[in-house]
Amino acid sequence: MTKNIMKLLLIEDDVFFRKFYVEKLKEKGFEIEEADDGEQGLEKTRSFKPDLIILDIIMPKKDGFEVLNTLHADDNLKKIPVLVFSTLGQESDVEKAKKLGAADYVNKSLFDFNDLLAKINILTKNKFQPTTSK
C-alpha cells in the first residue's frame, strides 16, 4: 500500500521558527519546503504545489495578507488550504486572514507543536483518505 506523503510549504521569515518547525514536521514524515518571504513563498507555491501552506503574516517583500490575496485570485492556487501561523492574534487580523481565504489561524506565540500538528491534520484529512481501489 503506497502512502501519500503530504507536501507542506512553510512561509516564515523568522529563522528560528522556520528551522524548528521544518525539522519537527520532517520527523513526522511530511515533505516540506520553506520560504523566507512572501514573494519566495508564492514562487515555491507554484513550483512545489503543496497540499497545505503554513503562512506567517509579518514578512518582508509581501506580507501574509498580500500572499493570501494573490493565492485567492489564482484559480489554480486558491484550492490549497492555508494555515496562518502568526504572532498577530487580534480578532481583526484573524478575521481579515479568513476573509482572504485562510482555512485556519494559529497564534505562534503559544508555540505548541502539537496544536500546529492537530490543525494540519484537520485541514488535510479529507485530502488524504486511504484509497480503496488499485
Image (tube, rainbow, N blue to C red):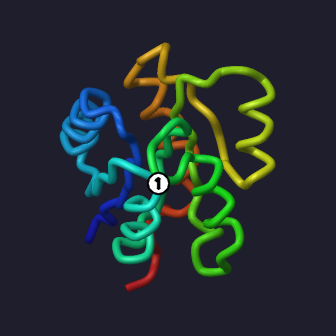
* Horizontal arrangement in the rendering, residue 33 relative to residue 37 (left or right): left
Q: Quadrant of the C terminus?
A: bottom left
Question: Along the line of sight, which residue is nearer the eye, 16 or 81?
Answer: 16
| Relative image position of residue 106 (x, y in whole percent) | 57, 29
Q: According to the image, label 1 marks what residue? A: 38
Is residue 85 positioned above or below 8 on the image? above
Callout 1: 10 Å neighbours few (<14), some, many (20+)?
many
Taking the spot 44% from the left edge, 61% from the top edge, the residue there is 39
Furthest residue to the front? Answer: 61
Q: Quadrant of the N terminus?
A: bottom left
* Horizontal arrangement in the rendering, residue 91 relative to residue 102 (left or right): right
Taking the spot 33% from the left edge, 66% from the top edge, the residue there is 4
Furthest residue to the top? Answer: 110
| Relative image position of residue 109 (x, y in whole percent) | 48, 16
| Relative image position of residue 2 (x, y in whole percent) | 26, 71
Q: Amino acid at mark 1?
A: Gly
Question: Along the line of sight, which residue is nearer the eye, 114 or 72?
Answer: 72
Question: Along the line of sight, which residue is nearer the eye, 58 or 27?
Answer: 58
State the image quarter where residue 67 is shown: bottom right
Is residue 6 positioned above or below 54 on the image? below
Taking the spot 71% from the left edge, 43% from the top edge, the residue there is 97
Q: How many marks?
A: 1
Taking the spot 28% from the left edge, 57% from the top edge, the residue there is 33
User: Please, what secondary structure does the residue beneath circle 1 have?
Assistant: helix
| Relative image position of residue 100 (x, y in whole percent) | 75, 53
Is residue 17 positioned above or below 79 on the image? above
